[in-house]
Image: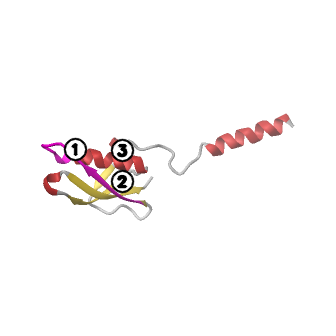
Amino acid sequence: MLKSVLLLSAAALVFSACSSHPVIPEKDDIKVSRDNPSDKCKNLGPIEGRSTKLNAKPEDALEDLKSEAVRKGADYVRIETMGAQSSSIRGTAFFCN
């Protein structure tokens, strides 16, 4: 009986460790491109990055876009449009790995 309980507990632990997103991406792990991702990637929806700084740089909006991608669990972003003076960037988030 005890052996069965231990075996079931071990199996539950092993299976609970598996998930569709085994590692949470970080901003540095996000690939950003204007190219379409591979067909195996899952579309996670539209995202937008903004910079509200007075002297906004494109890098500021890009960092915000990557943060939004991380929140959605994405590892790839296809850029769709850039706003005036690069204060905003819109794209589509994908999970590819």
Q: Name the residue located 41 percent from the left edge and 44 percent from the top edge.
A: 25
Image quadrant in which the N terminus is located: top right
Q: Name the residue located 24 percent from the left edge and 55 percent from the top edge.
A: 89
Circle 2 sits on which residue?
Answer: 76
Please report contact status of discs 3 and 2: CB closer than 8 Å, yes or no. no
Q: Name the residue located 40 percent from the left edge and 47 percent from the top edge.
A: 71
Element type at marker 2?
Answer: strand
Going from N to C along the chain, the mark reached first, 3 or 1, is 3
Quote the CA–CA distance across marks 3 and 2: 9 Å
- Which label lies toward us, 1 or 2? 1
Is 48 included in the stretch rendered in magenta? yes
Is 90 included in the stretch rendered in magenta? no
Element type at marker 1?
Answer: helix
Disc 1 residue type (three-letter): Asp
Element type at marker 3?
Answer: helix
Crowding at mark 1 (Cα within 10 Å: few <14, some 14-19, many 20+): some
Q: Residue furthest bottom?
A: 39
Crowding at mark 3 (Cα within 10 Å: few <14, some 14-19, many 20+): few
Please report contact status of discs 3 and 1: CB closer than 8 Å, yes or no. no
Going from N to C along the chain, the mark reached first, 3 or 2, is 3
What numbered label is drawn on residue 60? 1
Disc 2 residue type (three-letter): Tyr
Circle 3 sits on which residue?
Answer: 29
